[in-house]
Image (cartoon, helix red, strand yellow):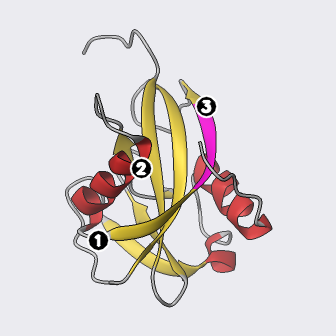
Amino acid sequence: MVDQIFPEPTVGVFIFNQADELLLVKSHKWPGKYVVPGGHVELGEHLEQAAIREAKEETGLDIHSLQFINFQQFIHDPAFWRRKHFIFFDFLCRTDSAEVKLNDEAEEHVWVRLDAALDLPLDSYTRVSVEKIIAGNLSSHP
């Protein structure tokens, strides 16, 4: 494995269904923690496009009504399964379906009310964004 030369921009997708429940997943990449779907921004791709693509790839869900939450810096945090430097760009969005089809990046999923999400073992970065959504302190654009 080649060491990173630059930080990797990634998107996190906070997907809400029609019942206003948040989709959380468990992944081997974040041992013992709930996280949201997401992944790398591809070369030439806008952040919003990456969020739409990653949501579809990882959950089978089509999303809409994206709203920027925040960005966070992740520098060699042992919470992730590999030593990485990421810049997370988190988005809140909606889906009209609740039929999740996980790819091989997640082992299980749950739909939860936002306040109940805080009672689960969330990864610390996911928790920051959930708290920001609850506080209603969202940005208009990244």
Foreground of the two, 46 or 124: 46
The alpha-carbon separation of the residues under discs 3 and 2 comes to 18 Å
Q: Residues within 10 Å of mark 3 (few under 14, many from 20)?
A: some
Assess whether mark 3 and mark 1 are in contact (beta carbons under 8 angstroms).
no
Name the residue carrying label 2.
48
Name the residue carrying label 1.
61
Magenta stretch: dominant SS?
Answer: strand
Q: Nearer the viewer, mark 1 or mark 3?
A: 1
Q: Earlier in the sequence, mark 3 or mark 2?
A: 2
Q: Nearer the viewer, mark 2 or mark 1?
A: 2
The amino acid sitting under disc 3 is Gln
Q: Give the extent of the magenta segment.
A: 68-73
Q: Residues within 10 Å of mark 1 (few under 14, many from 20)?
A: many
Query: Dot 3: what SS?
Result: strand
Snapshot quadrant of residue 26: bottom left
In percent of width and height, residue 120 lies at 60, 69
The amino acid sitting under disc 2 is Glu
| Residue 113 part of the magenta-drawn span | no
Query: Dot 2: what SS?
Result: helix
The alpha-carbon separation of the residues under discs 1 and 3 comes to 27 Å
Foreground of the two, 94 or 108: 94
Disc sitting over residue 73 in the figure = 3
In percent of width and height, residue 79 lies at 53, 39
Q: Earlier in the sequence, mark 2 or mark 1?
A: 2
Image quadrant for the C terminus? top right
The alpha-carbon separation of the residues under discs 2 and 1 comes to 15 Å
